[in-house]
Each structure stands twice: as structure tokens, then as C-alpha cells.
Amino acid sequence: MRPPFFSLLLSLVSFSWAATVTYDLDIGWVTANPDGQADRPVIGINGQWPIPVIEVTLGDRVVINVVNSLGNQSTSLHFHGLFMNGTTHMDGPVQVSQCAIPPGSRFTYDFEVTQPGTYWYHSHNKGQYPDGLRAPFIVHDPDNPYKDQYDEEVVLSVSDWYHEQMPDLVSFFMSRQNPSGAEPVPQAALFNDTQDLSLPLQPGKTYFIRMVNIGAFAGQYVWFEGHNMTIVEVDGVYTHPSTAEMIYLSAAQRCSFLLTAKNETDTNYPFVASMDTTLFDAYPEDLNYNVSGWLVYDDKKSLPKPALVDSLDAVFDDMNLVPHDDQPILGEPDQTVTLNTIMGNLDDGANYAFFNNITYTHAKVPTLYTALTAGDQATDPAVYGTYTHSFVLEKDQIIDIVVNNIDPGRHPFHLHGHEFQALHRSKEEAGPFEDSNVTAASFPAIPMRRDTLVLYPDGNMVLRFKANNPGVWLFHCHIEWHVVSGLAATFVEAPLELQKTIELPQEHLDICASQGIPVTGNAAGNKLDLLNLDGQPSPPGPLPAGFTARGIVALVFSCLSGILGVAVLVWYGLAGGENDPGLKTWAADVDAAPETRVLPQDGERTGDHGVSSGADAGIRT
Ligand SMILES: *[C@@H]1O[C@H](CO)[C@@H](O)[C@H](O)[C@H]1NC(C)=O
Ligand SMILES: *[C@@H]1O[C@H](CO)[C@@H](O)[C@H](O)[C@H]1NC(C)=O
Ligand SMILES: *[C@@H]1O[C@H](CO)[C@@H](O)[C@H](O)[C@H]1NC(C)=O
Ligand SMILES: *[C@@H]1O[C@H](CO)[C@@H](O)[C@H](O)[C@H]1NC(C)=O
Ligand SMILES: *[C@@H]1O[C@H](CO)[C@@H](O)[C@H](O)[C@H]1NC(C)=O
Ligand SMILES: *[C@@H]1O[C@H](CO)[C@@H](O)[C@H](O)[C@H]1NC(C)=O
Ligand SMILES: *[C@@H]1O[C@H](CO)[C@@H](O)[C@H](O)[C@H]1NC(C)=O
Ligand SMILES: *[C@@H]1O[C@H](CO)[C@@H](O)[C@H](O)[C@H]1NC(C)=O
Ligand SMILES: [Cu+2]
């Protein structure tokens, strides 16, 4: 047996061998047609699309030199799931940890990779990534606990695909013409940025398949005919092996599994990803929401059509996974943050997403830069402004996030800078966690960990993590439409520590200066009085008085009665927000509608939309 000091020595040696891996990424427009239906401009890298899969080894230092050659859009890169421990300024979200990289500028991401597994990288600016700027990011692990159980690794992305570009889709989505907030429905699904993909298999071999959903919106049901999956990793966390016939991968989730090839080569097998159509408000007749590929044992044999599957009930529940390291449940929380997910309209007639009563609007100063320049006041959440929805965490605190879904849609929630323990996820329609009879006693002793978890319609969930990574980290829904409509909050973790450890490279400050973005002071750019937030960027005001109460009723009623309510809202949008007696009459009829829960407008009014009184008027029926 090897004495322990020797293995320590070995690990020190291997650490010092860690390589620096450099990527030069020139981001620019190219044309692509991955579903064979339409050529369109996409955002490529170095003149190519799909953009490259980044592959590094655990412990590597990664240097990514970005040049923005788009000409007409700014950009940024986020490395989804990587902790960025000590380098929160390399995390990527625009106006959170950096300014956007304007056209013609350069920016270098420089960080160490301290976690093994399957990740991805994507733009974190203005709903941009679905235009093509997203791909897997793989961290190879010489000590992968399953390395003796497979022969080959395979990367396999899945995604939805749109024919229109995001800026156009977003401007319609966030408009008074779309008051119900119906998300654009994708035109196709893709495997590895194509369709009819072949995955050649050698008989008897076992494959470590790393699946990543790099899509914008749709969760995907995935299955391989005639083959089971043995799940061994989710979101960079190794798990004990679990057998699944079908998995569900939301936007941003990853799942790695072992798949063993048959010994016989007489048949090829289809595999399928089927978009979760319960997310869609419309089902265009010509939409094929499935994509298929084939496990090819013999390329001279036919590629059979996938069999129809009439139930998705066989889908594996990721809450049943157990991390391979058996990390026990963290101790009692020092802080519990409760976030109610709510959709509602503001006075521009568009539909916004809210955590409690706040729809995220980024600050004038990137939130990290406020943390770095606010001195002792950096521990006061107020300096980050109302609409970044910031929570300040002390170093090493245990934090619970309780998320209640006051919305009938699924939302895949993602936390930057951490993996969380998933302590509880209710079934659909369970109501808020506080109203349930679930107690801490029923939390698992060894909870599943990941960085993105799906919250079910009108359900709730409880997540726990330790604030052991000083930084500024977003918590948000990973449906890109909901990022755009404001479903995000900010955790400012150990800001005083950040002031001692983070030194911003000059180019970070330079790209702000070139765009006139202030880099010191509070969310409003105020340096003298950090509690004076006059001029902070803010969302539109609440629905106008007079419309408000009834509008909210209409909104709630619209959930119940569908078309009629939506029609009224559309009418409101087209009418330019003016009050109308006809609406009142109609609304009076529904005053007896069930209780209104869809109420983001509580509390103080801000912004310049002139609705200054009757803060509660909007919420009583
Ligand atoms: C930016 O340029 C691309 C490629 O030429 C073009 O397709 C796209 O419409 C432009 N987008 C904007 C927002 O101007
Ligand atoms: C998917 O694309 C990646 C990157 O090009 C490639 O490494 C991988 O082998 C592809 N997967 C399949 C199943 O073809
Ligand atoms: C897959 O797993 C299910 C349930 O464990 C089992 O019934 C089935 O036979 C397995 N299929 C294959 C191809 O191994
Ligand atoms: C394939 O053959 C090997 C060796 O005979 C055997 O161990 C293995 O169980 C077989 N695999 C399957 C899926 O039947
Ligand atoms: C997609 O696949 C599902 C599951 O097999 C099937 O029920 C559905 O009919 C398919 N849809 C289309 C448009 O092919
Ligand atoms: C919670 O309450 C419901 C309804 O009262 C009951 O059916 C369920 O068994 C309870 N669950 C627990 C964990 O006590
Ligand atoms: C970040 O690094 C510190 C210091 O090495 C360590 O204590 C902490 O656990 C790390 N956090 C994460 C999330 O890895
Ligand atoms: C949200 O609600 C809280 C608590 O009622 C209140 O203090 C705050 O001013 C409200 N914020 C907004 C933006 O309405
Ligand atoms: Cu969402």
C-alpha cells in the first residue's frame, strides 16, 4: 500500500502539471440551415457553425480570447455550471459581472477549472444565445469513477431551433401585442445541431454519453430504443448509477449515462428527443416537435422509423439520484430566501415575469462593480438597487431558496457559482411550500445536487447551498424568454471578501468606458450617497389605475377561460392602454372570479409612469 504522503505528493505534482489551454474565438455571423428548412444568419465562431465544443482537463487554466466581430450586436460568454471560484468577474452575465463586449472589442476569459464533467458555454446577453452562440464545454477527468466501465466518450447536444432571429422574436414577445406572454414556439428540434444524426456503435462496447440541452426553451424527453441508460452524472455531479428508460432534460441541464451496445449488429435503433409541448401556447400544425437519430450497428442496414410512444410516464425522476460522493444534507439554513414565480402585465401592456413583486432589470453599474466599490455598504442589499433583486450572503452561510410556482408552466431554475442540494420538489399544483405539510424531517439525508432543476406547474421546491464561493451570482429561470422578461434574482456573496480578492483587468473597465457605463457606485451610478437610487433603471410601472384591478381580474380570468380573457388583454394592448367602459362592464361580470393570486403590483411605485397612489388598488377584487 502506498503511504498517504506519497499520494499527497502525487496530487501536488499533478496539480503543477496542469496545463493552460488557450482558445481564440472570433465571434461573427455565418449562415446555417441545421434543420434543412431554412437558411438563416447564425452566430458562429472563427467562421464556422456549429461553434466548437470546448474540451479541457480538470485542473486546467483556461484562457479564452474573444473578439466580437458581429458588427451589430454586443456579446459575452458564460460558462454554465463552472464555479469560477475566485474569478466571479469571468462569469459572463452582462451588467452583473461585466459590461457587454461591444462590436470590435476584445475580451479575455481566464479561469481555472476545478470541477469535472459536462458543462456548456453560451452568450449571456439580451437573449442572444439561441441565435447559435452556445455549445458543450467538457471537463475530462483522469479520475472519473466510471472510467473502467466504458470504452468511449460521446458528446451529444440537443436543442430547439428557431428560424427567426432573437432580437425580432424578443421584441414581439415583450410587446403589447403579446399580453399573455406566449413564448415563441420553435420550428424544430436538433441533435448535435443537425437532424438524422448517426451514432456508430461497436458491438459490446460501452459508451459514456454526455448529453447537454443547449436550447432556449423546450425541455426534451429523450430515449434510445432497445437500450437503457445508466445515469452517472448530472450537471457535473457524479451520481451512483441509476437505470433510466427515458430522461427529461430541460434547457441548460446535462445528463451523462453509460449506454452498452448490443452484441448483435443485425438492427439499427432510433433514438428520439421530443420537445415538451406542454410549454407551448400554440401547436403549429406543421411542427415536428421530435428529432431522431440512430444507433448505427451496421451502416448497410436500414434506419427504422422511431416507434410511437404514447406515454411519457416512464421518464426518470432526477430527485431519485444520489451523488457519488454521498455528501450529506447541509445543516440548518442561516438564511431562507423565498421566491414566488409570477407572470403579469405592466403598463406597457407587455407580459413580465416576477420573483415576488420584482421583475429583474439590470442596474446601471454592473452589480459586481457596485460590490467592489461600495465599501462597507456593500453588505446592504439596497445599494444594488430594487430591480436586481439582490440578496447579500455572508461567507459560509447555509442558504435555502424556496421557490413557489404561482404559474401553470414549468421553469428550469439555475444558480450560477454553485451546485445546490435539491431538498424537495413538489408535484404539480401542490401550492406554495409554506402551505404544504412537508417538513425538514422529510428532506433526504443525501440530497441530489445539480445546478439546474425543473420546478413543476403551481408547485414548489427547496434548494440549499453553502455560500463558500465569494461572488455575484444570478439565480434565474433558464428559459431564455423568461430571462428576458425578468425571472431573475441576484446573490451577492461575501462582498467584503470580493473587495480584498478581485482585481479587475483593465480591459473590463475599458469596455465599460467605451460605452459610457459607470463602474463605481450604486445601481444608479451614484457614488456619494449609496442609498440614493434616483435614476436606477426600472421596469415600466404597474397597469394604469382603473384598468388595474379589473385587468388583473381579466388576467386571472384569462387563465380560467382562455380565449376570452386573452382577447380582452389583446384588446387592451391594441387600444393603447386607455381605459374603456366596455371593459369595466365586462370586468364587473367577473368580479366574482376566484381569488387573485397573480399580483406582482404590490408595494411602492417607481419609475416615471405616473401611477403614484393606490398601491393596493390593483390587488383587491
Ligand atoms: C445583424 O447582422 C446580421 C447579419 O448580417 C443580420 O442578419 C441581422 O439582422 C442584424 N441584426 C441586427 C439586430 O441588426
Ligand atoms: C456531436 O458533436 C461533437 C462536436 O462536433 C462531436 O464530438 C460528437 O462526436 C458528436 N456526437 C455524435 C453522436 O455524433
Ligand atoms: C430497461 O430497464 C427496464 C426497467 O428496469 C427493464 O424492464 C428493461 O428490460 C430494460 N431494457 C433493456 C433493453 O435492458
Ligand atoms: C455480449 O457478450 C458478452 C460476452 O459473451 C457478454 O458478457 C455480454 O453480457 C453480452 N452483452 C449483452 C448485452 O448481451
Ligand atoms: C413525436 O413523438 C411522439 C412520441 O413517440 C409521438 O406521440 C408523436 O406523434 C410524434 N409527433 C410527431 C409530429 O411526429
Ligand atoms: C400531507 O397532507 C395530505 C393531506 O392532508 C396528506 O394526504 C399527506 O399524507 C400529508 N403528507 C405528509 C408527508 O404528511
Ligand atoms: C472556493 O475556494 C475556497 C478556497 O479554496 C474553498 O474553501 C471553497 O469550498 C470553494 N468553493 C467552491 C464552490 O468550490
Ligand atoms: C415589494 O414588496 C416589499 C414588501 O412588501 C416592499 O417593501 C417593496 O417596496 C416592494 N417592491 C416593489 C418594487 O414593489
Ligand atoms: Cu421560466
Image (cartoon, rainbow, N blue to C red):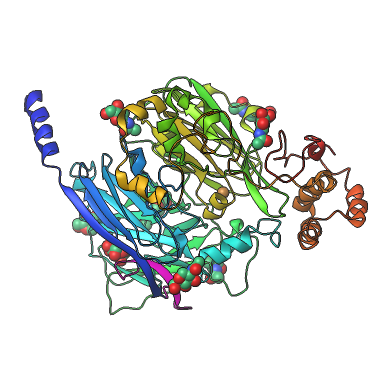
- Which residue is nearer to you in this view: 203 or 120? 120
Q: Quadrant of residue 431?
A: top right
- Which residue is nearer to you in this view: 203 or 442? 442
Look at the image and tell me in which quarter the C terminus lies. top right
Query: Which residue range is magenta in the image?
Result: 33-49
Q: Which residue sits at x=28%, y=58%? A: 154
Asked if residue 530 lies left or right of residue 256, the reply is right
- Which residue is nearer to you in this view: 226 or 28? 28
Q: Does the image show residue 6?
A: yes
Magenta stretch contains residue 151: no
Is 5 located above or below residue 274 in the figure? above
Q: Does the image show residue 35?
A: no
- Percent across and percent down for residue 486 are 58, 47
- Percent across and percent down for residue 97 are 41, 42
Asked if residue 620 lies left or right of residue 167, the reply is right
Q: Which residue sits at x=85%, y=44%? A: 593
- Which residue is nearer to you in this view: 63 or 157? 63
Is 363 located above or below residue 575 in the figure? above
- Percent across and percent down for residue 197 are 36, 70
Look at the image and tell me in which quarter the N terminus lies. top left
Task: Please count the marks in the image.
Answer: 0
Asked if residue 347 lies left or right of residue 427, the reply is right
- Percent across and percent down for residue 386 are 59, 35
Which residue is outermost to the front? 528
Q: Quadrant of residue 199?
A: bottom left
Is 510 located above or below residue 436 in the figure? below
Q: Quadrant of residue 281?
A: bottom right
Asked if residue 446 lies left or right of residue 289, the reply is left
Helix, strand or loop: magenta stretch? loop
